[in-house]
Image (cartoon, rainbow, N blue to C red):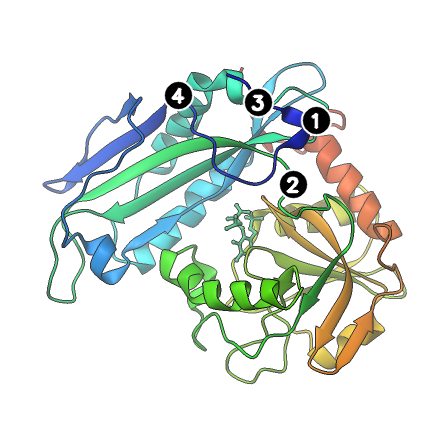
Amino acid sequence: MNIDWNNLGFGYIKTPYRFISHFKDGKWDEGVLSEDEIVKINECAGVLQYAQTCFEGLKAYRTTDNRVVCFRPDLNAKRMHDSCQRLEMPVYPDDKFIEAVIKTVKSNIDYVPPYGYGATLYIRPYMFGENPVIGVKPADEYQFRIFTTPVGPYFKGGVKPITIRVPDFDRAAPRGTGHIKAGLNYAMSLHPIVDAHKNGFDENMYLDPATRTKVEETGGANFIFITKDNTVVTPKSNSILPSITRRSLLYVAEKYLGLKTIEREIPFEEVKTFKECALCGTAAVLSPVGKIVNKDTEILLPSGMENMGEVTKQLYDTLLGIQLGKIDPPEGWLKEII
Ligand code: PLP
Ligand code: COI
């Protein structure tokens, strides 16, 4: 193993073990850890024809006192459960999900980056329909897998503010397909992401696909905004992913920092009145946004392009402090691995 922890980006690095469980004849098998990273499936597999697949994302952190923990895996289990039900896939039981996450991280423990490098072990549970399906219907056989990969910051500049734009594209269908983590939602965001990068933007700010007037989320993270009176405001919508990081930040804002929080619809027109803006998610952590471009108009957030806004920084330090074992966590937030 020869990894430069200082210069990790957000990419795939093969780690020794992955967890694999098969669903067949109406039940899940016990599952195994395997050294083989190659998935070999039928050409007509449900996932290849009708994109019957969903996934989750969480991280393992090495703490200041050299424990390894992961952050609220029960909520990933629950959300994957919801994704599977919406996609007519068999649910992988929540307790088994957590057990499998722990097993997979333990077996790759040397790949959990040491404390102090700003790097983590990203954990990717996913499921897909495996047997041949040619009529439009769900598969009968599935694989549930978990692999891990050490990662650094999602955006190249780390915590440097990024520039995003409002694209001409919709990513989700108008009636709420964004609230699950399904392959097809993400496939629909690939063209807008490539187009954003081509035009010099780091991400897209999607508006609601029904009216294109309200702020939704980006390709891989939710939004939070800070108002002039230091209230944390975040979009209410049934076509965005219910981010675990966002739920945690709202709790941290209220209970640790004494800030007011509101989840409500946010007209794009209101964005120019906010003091700070940031993207939150497992991969994005809390990435400050400095500028938002909508065709010919630019919104420059008062927090600017150099530093994180003041409230964003407090939220970031507190959340990371909890994840790295420096600040006492709320009951049940950290699942100890070793
Ligand atoms: N929104 C989208 C589209 C995402 O892909 C993610 C990442 O998982 C998030 C939001 C953030 O969710 P979480 O905080 O649970 O990682
Ligand atoms: C995550 O933050 O876990 C995500 O899924 C975002 C992206 C890498 C898809």
User: Could you say which quadrant of the image residue 200 lies in?
Assistant: bottom right
Residue linked to disc 2: 153
| Looking at the image, residue 230 lies above or below residue 249 | below
Judging from the image, what secondary structure is the residue with disc 1 in?
A: loop
Pair 3/2: label in front: 3
Q: Are marks 4 and 1 in contact (CB under 8 Å)?
A: no
Residue linked to disc 1: 117
Residue linked to disc 3: 3
Image check: 321 left or right of 202? Answer: right
Type of amino acid under label 2: Pro
For the residues marked 1 and 3, what is the alpha-carbon distance in whole angstroms? 12 Å
Q: Tell me which numbered mark, 1 or 2, is placed earlier along the sequence.
A: 1
Residue linked to disc 4: 16
Q: Nearer the viewer, residue 261 or 21?
A: 21
Image quarter hosting the C terminus: top right
Residue furthest to the front in view is: 198
Q: Residue at x 67, y 34 (%)?
A: 330
Percent of width and height locating residue 214: 63, 77
Type of amino acid under label 3: Ile
Percent of width and height locating residue 280: 65, 51
For the residues marked 3 and 2, what is the alpha-carbon distance in whole angstroms? 15 Å
Judging from the image, what secondary structure is the residue with disc 2 in?
A: loop
What's the mark number on residue 203? none
Q: Is mark 1 within 8 Å of ligand 2?
A: no
How packed mark 2 is, by other alpha carbons closer than 10 Å (few <14, some 14-19, many 20 or more), is many
Percent of width and height locating residue 24: 13, 39
Q: Are marks 1 and 2 in contact (CB under 8 Å)?
A: no
Q: Can see residue 257?
A: no
Percent of width and height locating residue 307: 86, 50
